[in-house]
Image (spheres, grey):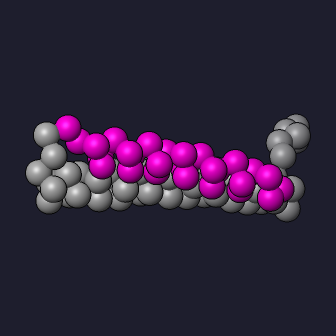
């Protein structure tokens, strides 16, 4: 008796896996870029506050908020490219 199992290496499955993996790579790359931007700007603000000897971390707050806004802008812009 022959079982009716789909071929695990068929062209349809390869194509579906390729699409799935490229989507995963795209979104994980965007997340990494967002994280890097936020960390870099926040660290820069921290160093500016340290250099100016501010008691209130003004630059850290400003640059971290600017980096979040910039990251969201880049994310929305990349979604609109589709």
Q: Quadrant of the C terminus?
A: bottom right
Residue 8 visible somewhere in the drawing: no
Foreground of the two, 54 or 19: 54
Q: Main secondary structure of the magenta part?
A: helix
Foreground of the two, 46 or 21: 46
Point 76% across, 56% down: residue: 19
Residue 22: x, y in percent? 68, 59
Point 63% across, 50% down: residue: 73
Quadrant position of residue 57: top left
Residue 16: x, y in percent? 79, 53
Foreground of the two, 10 or 57: 57
Residue 63 visible somewhere in the drawing: yes
Give the tally of numbered discs: 0
Quadrant position of residue 50: bottom left
Residue 62 magenta-highlighted = yes
Residue 11: x, y in percent? 85, 62
Residue 36: x, y in percent? 41, 57
Residue 74 magenta-highlighted = yes
Point 44% across, 43% down: residue: 65
Q: Could you tell whether 65 is left or right of 4 in the image?
A: left
Point 46% across, 51% down: residue: 67
Q: Could you tell whether 48 is left or right of 26 in the image?
A: left
Q: Quadrant of the N terminus?
A: top right
Q: Could you tell whether 10 is left or right of 28 in the image?
A: right
First to last magenta residue range: 56-82
Foreground of the two, 7 or 62: 62
């Amino acid at each position: 008796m022959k079982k009716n199992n789909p071929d695990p290496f068929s062209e349809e499955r390869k194509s579906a896996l390729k699409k799935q993996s490229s989507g995963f790579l795209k979104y994980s790359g965007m997340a990494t870029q967002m994280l890097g931007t936020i960390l870099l700007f926040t660290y820069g603000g921290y160093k500016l506050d340290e250099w100016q000897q501010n008691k209130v971390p003004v630059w850290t707050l400003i640059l971290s908020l600017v980096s979040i806004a910039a990251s969201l802008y880049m994310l929305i812009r990349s979604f609109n490219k589709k």
